[in-house]
Image: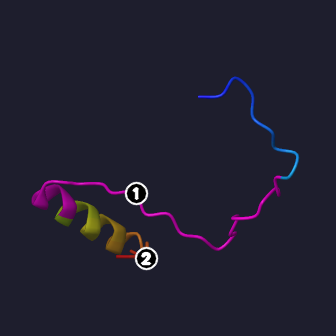
Amino acid sequence: MKTEYDFTQGERGKFYNPDAVLNFPVYLEPDVDEFMRKLAEEKDIISRI
């Protein structure tokens, strides 16, 4: 690793996308997953899966 980096030619926000949706992998046991899906349905929370 360098001791110092030069960002003078850098462009702030070049890869920023305000509409990006991040999906973090969450692995649940099947029974927990089913419970959470039912709970989300009852609370009218839309699943993006």
On residue 24, the disc is: 1
Structural crowding at the residue carrying mark 1, measured as other residues with C-alpha within 10 Å and reported as few (<14), some (14–19) or many (≥20): few
CA–CA distance in space, label 2 to label 1: 16 Å
> SS at mark 2?
loop
Instruction: In the displayed orientation, state which residue is furthest to the right.
Output: 8
Label 2, on which residue?
46
Identify the amino acid type marked 1.
Answer: Phe
Location of residue 39 with respect to 29 vertically, above or below: below
Mark nearer the N terminus (2 vs 1): 1
Q: In percent of the image, x 30 and y 54: which residue is there?
A: 26
Q: In front: 49, or 25?
A: 25
Q: In percent of the image, x 81 and y 44: which residue is there?
A: 7
Identify the amino acid type marked 2.
Answer: Ile
Location of residue 34 with respect to 44 vertically, above or below: above
Q: In front: 28, or 35?
A: 28
Q: Position of residue 48 (x, y in %)?
A: 41, 76
